[in-house]
Amino acid sequence: MSDLVLELSGIRKTYNVGLPNEVQVLRGIDLKIKAGEVVALVAPSGAGKSTLLHMAGLLDTPDAGDVTFGGQNMQGLNDWKRTGLRRDDIGFVYQFHHLLPEFTAIENIVLPQLAAGVGRKAAHERAFDLLGRVGVAERADHRPAALSGGEAQRVAFCRALANGPRLLLGDEPTGNLDPTTSDQVFGALMDLVRSTGLAAVIATHNLELAARMDRVVRLGAGVLRNEPHI
């Protein structure tokens, strides 16, 4: 069985911003991600990195090209099946944690597991284990408002990995943190990713963080190119 988790082939996406103007955001993107591989996606603001991550995460569909996940072509997959794949096999983390404010840290990690059909006891055990791996188990019963920015983002990482996904997509996941906290939180993320062996694509402006990943791809003018490790 191939260890290829995600393959994007010839992905194109154009947005109409008022006729006759069109913006070609992606112009034939090719990308392969293997299990256990952490890839840095480096791009300036407005270059289309969020659009690319949405394609990879089955949140949007390309105008042309193919998205293959786990050896299965996603073209023509109905919304119900796409939703199931996003829930069970793809984890998302963003610049802001987006934790549910009325629930505690551990409850935020339990909820997606319950939605996937995991029993409550097993879900709590996994949530507490994940919190322990990123060093915030003692904050399990705190609501997001009582957490620091770094703690909240660590909880968000745990939530993204709650259902044991095969692919993690991060859109500037440390971009809202100060440099010291960013470095600490990114280290916790990398430890978590390495220990689970999943594939990951992390968008970042931070070249120092990018250098700590396995390889770097840069998006610009709608095309993607591999770069020598920085």
Image (cartoon, rainbow, N blue to C red):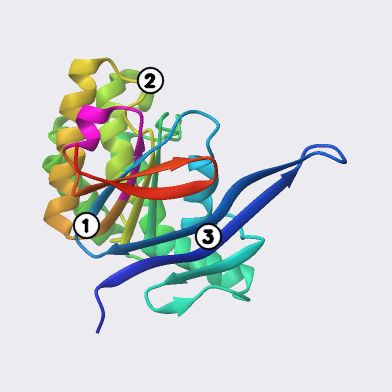
149 above or below 16? Answer: above
Please identify the quarter of the rendering in which residue 120 is found: bottom left
Whether residue 53 is visible, yes or no, is: yes
User: Which residue sits at x=38%, y=66%?
Assistant: 6
Q: Which residue is mark 2?
A: 145
Disc nearer the start of the sequence (3/2): 3
Residue shown at the point (25%, 27%) measured from the top left: 151
| Residue 160 pos. (x, y %) | 34, 48
Q: Is residue 122 magenta?
A: no
Give the residue pinned by disc 3: 58
Instruction: Write the residue at 63% across / 53% down.
Output: 13
The tag earlier along the polypeptide, 2 or 1, is 1
Task: Judge depth for marks 2 and 1 and give the one in front.
Answer: 1
Q: Earlier in the sequence, mark 3 or mark 1?
A: 1
Q: Give whichever of 192, 67 is nearer the camera.
A: 67
Label 2, secondary structure: give it: helix
Q: Residues within 10 Å of mark 2 (few under 14, many from 20)?
A: few
Residues at marks 3 and 2, CA–CA distance in whole angstroms: 31 Å
Name the amino acid, label 1: Glu
- Residue of label 1: 37
Q: x%, y% of residue 183?
A: 18, 25
Q: CA distance from mark 2 to mark 1?
A: 33 Å
Direction from residue 102 to residue 195 in the image, left or right: left
Element carrying mark 3? loop
For marks 3 and 2, give the one nearer the viewer.
3
Disc 2 residue type? Ala
